[in-house]
Image (spheres, grey):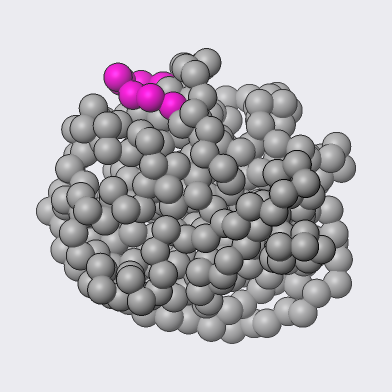
Amino acid sequence: MKTRVFAILLVLVVASSLTFAQDSRPLILEHANAVNPQSDAPGQARSQRPVELATLPRVDITVLVENMAGGGPVLGEWGLSFLVETDRRRILFDTGGGQTLLGNARSLGVDLSKIDAIVISHGHDDHTGGLGKALEACGPVDFFVHPAAFTTRYWKEGSRAVPDVMPFSQDQLHRLVRNLVETANSTSVCEGMMVTGQIPRLTNFEDTGVREFAFLDAELKKPNPILDDQALFFRVPEGVVILLGCGHAGVVNTIRYVSELVGGQKIYAVMGGSHLLNASPLRLQKTIETFRKFDLQKIMLCHCTGIDAYAEIAKAFPGRSSWPACGTKVRFGGK
């Protein structure tokens, strides 16, 4: 969405120390899409054997960009970017809106030149606006993005259609990155970590969250289904962790799909944007029911989730919910 800078409104800190490790090149492996047909609406179900996902002993996440400023001398910005670190790899998940990534990284002691890979959750500019600065700081990296992210889309602003395009074309990225990996299907980013690729839309209560404003055509007639929306996921000893950019595919669709991909193994946590900002009461109720069904132990929603929706979820899951503002550092595993 169009970049907006937020004032510092809220301090929400999840404290955890981080240990930085030596980086190395990611392994790339693609899988066919799969989906669990356990939905509230009819849809085409594709199935496969569960993907092989190694258990990582520890994964550290630093929130580099988020709407609100939390721990450390950082600035808030409408957008999202996570640094995801394993013992051997460093992955940048999204790049924010472009105004705070580099400054916040410096303030938090993050060396972007040691990044191995960049994963883009979807092509909106609050997740790709910092891409140019990130690529300049990182140098050649492996780059994971759904091919639909390169399609020209349009935002409705008043009566105008405003084009929305990725900062770089496929041809430009081929020259700038080490490997350009288009993730229409679920794809391994490195050992123990995967991106979902395109997520099947099977629920009848979820939508993109921006259907009144996002279109595929300049005449503003064809709603944009945001097919490029994808999530990053990995397994630690506690279970599987899912990282969302905006969750335009629907957080319930995403959780169910990841559960199918990993063969029904325990989903431990979900973290990131969920676009519940304008969710109907029914959608919010169904989302909470799904979180309860999967017995999520950590629910760390932020960015486009919306304060009201977050408050309802926090009330439903006391002690398990938090808002990971910019500067938050959290460790999964490593106990």
Q: Which of the 4 image quadrants contains residue 111?
A: top left
One can see residue 13 in this view: no
Over which residues does the magenta segment extend? 70-76
Image coords of residue 149 (percent x, y) = 53, 66
Q: Residue furthest front?
A: 160
Residue nearest the viewer, comparing 116 with 57: 116
Q: With 277 as the anchor, is 56 left or right in this view?
A: left
Q: Residue at x 16, y 52 (%)?
A: 114
Does the magenta run of residues contain 72?
Answer: yes
Residue 177 visible in the picture: yes
Magenta run includes residue 161: no
Task: Identify the image quadrant of residue 311.
Answer: top right
Residue 136 lies, in percent from the top left, at: 22, 53
Vertical comparison of 115 with 104: above or below: below
Is 270 left, or right, of 39 in this rendering?
left
Residue 230 pos. (x, y %): 54, 62
Q: Residue at x 66, y 26 (%)?
A: 307
Q: Nearer the viewer, residue 233 or 123?
A: 123
Identify which residue is drawn at 58% across, 66% down: 152
Q: Main secondary structure of the magenta part?
A: loop
The one of 36 and 170 positioned closer to us in this rendering: 170
Position of residue 280 relative to residue 41, above or below, is above
